[in-house]
Image (cartoon, helix red, strand yellow):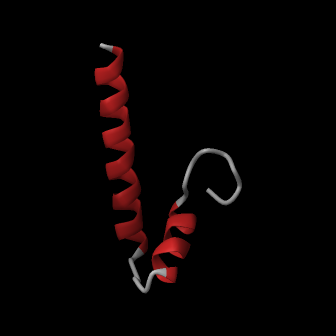
Amino acid sequence: DKDGDGQITTKELGTVMRSLGQNPSESELQDMINEVDADTTAQSISRNS
C-alpha cells in the first residue's frame, strides 16, 4: 500500500510480484485482488453475524 490509503492496487501488487521474480499478467493481478476482496468481505460478514 504505497500511498497509505489502505488498499492495494493491481499496479502495486504487480510491483511486489515482479520484485519476487514473478511476471503475472494484468488479468492475473486483477483475479488475485478480486479473490482477496471476496474473502475479506465474507469474513467481515461472518464476524458481524
Residue 33 percent location from the top left of the image: 41, 55
Q: In which quadrant will I find the N terminus?
A: bottom right
Give the mark count.
0
Residue 3 percent location from the top left of the image: 71, 55
Q: In which quadrant will I find the C terminus?
A: top left
Up the image or down, 33 lies above or below 16; here it is: above
- Locate residue 28: give its quadrant: bottom left
Up the image or down, 17 lies above or below 3; here it is: below
- Locate residue 27: give its quadrant: bottom left
Residue 24 percent location from the top left of the image: 38, 77
* Residue lying furthest bottom: 21
Residue 47 percent location from the top left of the image: 33, 21
- Locate residue 2: give its quadrant: bottom right
Residue at the location (41% across, 66% down)?
A: 29
Up the image or down, 19 lies above or below 33; here it is: below
Residue at the location (37% across, 38% down)?
A: 40
* Residue lying furthest right: 3
Q: Nearer the viewer, residue 29 or 15?
A: 15
Residue at the location (34% across, 59% down)?
A: 31
Residue at the location (54% across, 55% down)?
A: 8
